[in-house]
Image (tube, rainbow, N blue to C red):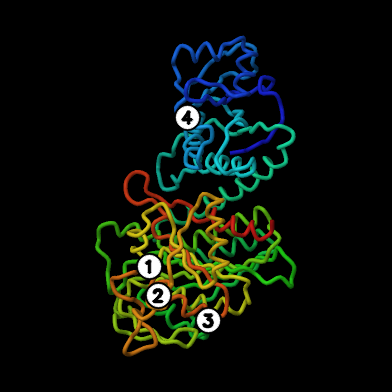
């Protein structure tokens, strides 16, 4: 989808469809009143007939409205509130696209300057709307013999007054970059696990490196991981025929002397649970256990699209967790890259094992901050559902920055505690630490585990088990989150 920003009078634009907002009670804003006046009261006459009440998301398509160059006018309800919330704006955007994609027109003009959104300026409102519109175009039908019918809609023009033109253009550019990152994340997540394995992700990284001169890529294989002493990482992969990969992507957009930010993604391309095998029902969705790595990949894509002036290191911890005669057993003890020993009480708590060694590896880059992203615990879904990501960390400033970024991006997180009392649940009689802490506070004890390996830098952990994909039903699929949150965090570092 192509997005264009223009400053022009809406009645002068030749377009297949002109979109105008209508408030509940059939009220027209400044733009609507202008169009109504130009069309000799045609819009208000239609509204008086009662065909559109103006409730949020209601639509009414008008043809051959007099004195306009637009072939059609789409009236869209924006509700009765003076200002919309973020969720309402998303619903409005989805409703608009839902109508436009089914029309024969190749383009549309959105005259939505009058729509106000709580707590958002022109940039924030525009970016959220364009992100929502671009995200609505996403389709994953790569493995369908019959593809979805292609929409004729190819271009959307956003109208702006001259004073706001630069901000609308900036917001539109950022939104398209974020939407592209989300689409890339979704594609990786939705791929079947027989194709999307650690070696496949390594090849994707190499391809990205070839396309961008300021991106260096290094792939650490089993031999290199063994040399580094990554015993926890290798313990996860040893039951699988698919070899593990630690993928290092180093983006240099800032000065050479600038310390990088680091994003670490859990990339378990399929998680059976290992010897501690999962129930069969719903196990197909364990292909989404690599969505942490996919979201880091997608965030990097957004950063590359925008060419942000920062340095960024992305570390993708990729492995497949399978049961076999070589698989790790409950009760095994392994030595991590940090030298700490771990008693593996449950092989289904594998994400923290690949992450702990990767977090240790991150130290060599002397990062300003490290954020790991992982579909780590089912307990997080119990606590926060599918709307909010869990957030923990050892640096309050970093945690607050991420909370603020989530609020700005409408991709929210919620802080959970990392009190010392929870650390005691990880005590082991045989090793330095156990990989699980019992049935209580599972999300927090997982964060406590990771905190043992992050003492030398500012660190935060995002548990996206409930937000990275939509589970079950016809809408099942990767969500693309938390690409907006992570990208906003990085944008905030350069603005």
Q: Which mark is residue 79?
A: 4
Q: Which residue is mark 2?
A: 237
Q: Earlier in the sequence, mark 2 or mark 1?
A: 2
**C-alpha distance separating marks 1 and 4:** 39 Å
Q: Position of residue 373 (x, y in %)?
A: 48, 64
Q: Which mark is residue 224?
A: 3
Q: Looking at the image, can residue 241 be seen? A: no
| Circle 3 crowding by C-alpha within 10 Å: few under 14, some 14–19, many from 20 | few
- Residue extending farthest to the bottom is 430
343 horizontally vs 416: left or right = left
Q: Which residue is mark 1?
A: 443
Q: Looking at this view, is 121 or 309 the one in front?
A: 121
Callouts 1 and 4 close, C-beta under 8 Å: no
Q: Helix, strand, or loop for circle 4?
A: loop
Q: Looking at the image, can residue 325 be seen? A: yes
Q: Looking at this view, is 435 or 412 the one in front?
A: 412
Q: Looking at this view, is 263 or 450 the one in front?
A: 450
Q: Looking at this view, is 335 or 410 the one in front?
A: 410
Q: Helix, strand, or loop for circle 1?
A: helix
Q: Position of residue 119 (x, y in %)?
A: 57, 44
**C-alpha distance separating marks 4 and 3:** 59 Å
Quadrant location of residue 327? bottom left
């Amino acid at each position: 989808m192509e997005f264009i920003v223009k400053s022009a009078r809406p009645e002068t634009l030749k377009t297949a469809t002109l979109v105008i907002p209508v408030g509940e009670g059939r009220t027209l804003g400044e733009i609507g009143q202008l169009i109504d006046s130009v069309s000799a009261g045609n819009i208000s006459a239609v509204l008086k007939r009662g065909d559109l009440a103006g409730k949020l998301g209601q639509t009414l398509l008008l043809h051959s409205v007099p004195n306009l160059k637009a072939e059609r006018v789409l009236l869209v309800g924006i509700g009765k509130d003076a200002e919309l919330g973020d969720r309402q704006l998303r619903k409005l955007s989805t409703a608009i696209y839902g109508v436009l994609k089914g029309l024969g027109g190749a383009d549309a003009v959105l005259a939505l300057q009058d729509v106000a959104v709580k707590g958002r300026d022109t940039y924030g409102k525009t970016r959220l709307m364009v992100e929502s519109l671009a995200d609505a175009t996403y389709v994953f039908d790569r493995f369908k013999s019959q593809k979805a019918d292609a929409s004729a809609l190819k271009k959307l023009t956003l109208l702006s007054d001259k004073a706001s033109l630069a901000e609308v253009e900036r917001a539109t550019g950022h939104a398209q970059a974020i939407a592209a990152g989300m689409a890339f994340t979704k594609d990786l997540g939705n791929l079947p696990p027989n194709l999307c394995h650690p070696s496949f992700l390594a090849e994707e990284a190499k391809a990205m490196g070839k396309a961008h001169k300021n991106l260096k890529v290094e792939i650490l294989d089993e031999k290199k991981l063994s040399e580094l002493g990554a015993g926890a990482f290798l313990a996860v992969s040893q039951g699988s025929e698919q070899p593990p990969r630690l993928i290092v992507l180093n983006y240099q957009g800032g000065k050479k002397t600038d310390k990088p930010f680091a994003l670490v993604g859990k990339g378990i391309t399929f998680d059976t649970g290992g010897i501690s095998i999962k129930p069969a029902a719903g196990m197909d969705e364990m292909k989404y256990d690599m969505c942490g790595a996919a979201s880091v990949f997608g965030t990097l894509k957004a950063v590359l699209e925008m060419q942000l002036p920062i340095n960024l290191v992305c570390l993708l911890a990729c492995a497949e967790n399978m049961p076999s005669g070589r698989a790790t057993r409950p009760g095994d003890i392994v030595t991590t890259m940090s030298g700490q020993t771990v008693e593996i009480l449950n092989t289904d708590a594998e994400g923290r094992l690949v992450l702990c060694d990767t977090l240790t590896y991150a130290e060599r880059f002397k990062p300003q901050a490290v954020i790991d992203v992982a579909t780590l615990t089912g307990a997080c879904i119990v606590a926060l559902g599918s709307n909010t990501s869990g957030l923990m960390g050892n640096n309050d400033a970093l945690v607050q920055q991420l909370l603020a970024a989530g609020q700005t991006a409408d991709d929210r997180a919620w802080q959970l505690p990392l009190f010392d009392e929870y650390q005691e649940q990880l005590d082991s009689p045989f090793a330095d630490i156990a990989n699980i802490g019992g049935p209580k506070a599972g999300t927090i004890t997982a964060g406590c585990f990771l905190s043992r390996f992050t003492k030398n830098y500012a660190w935060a952990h995002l548990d996206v088990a409930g937000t990275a994909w939509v589970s079950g039903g016809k809408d099942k699929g990767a969500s693309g989150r938390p690409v907006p949150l992570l990208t906003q965090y990085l944008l905030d570092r350069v603005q």
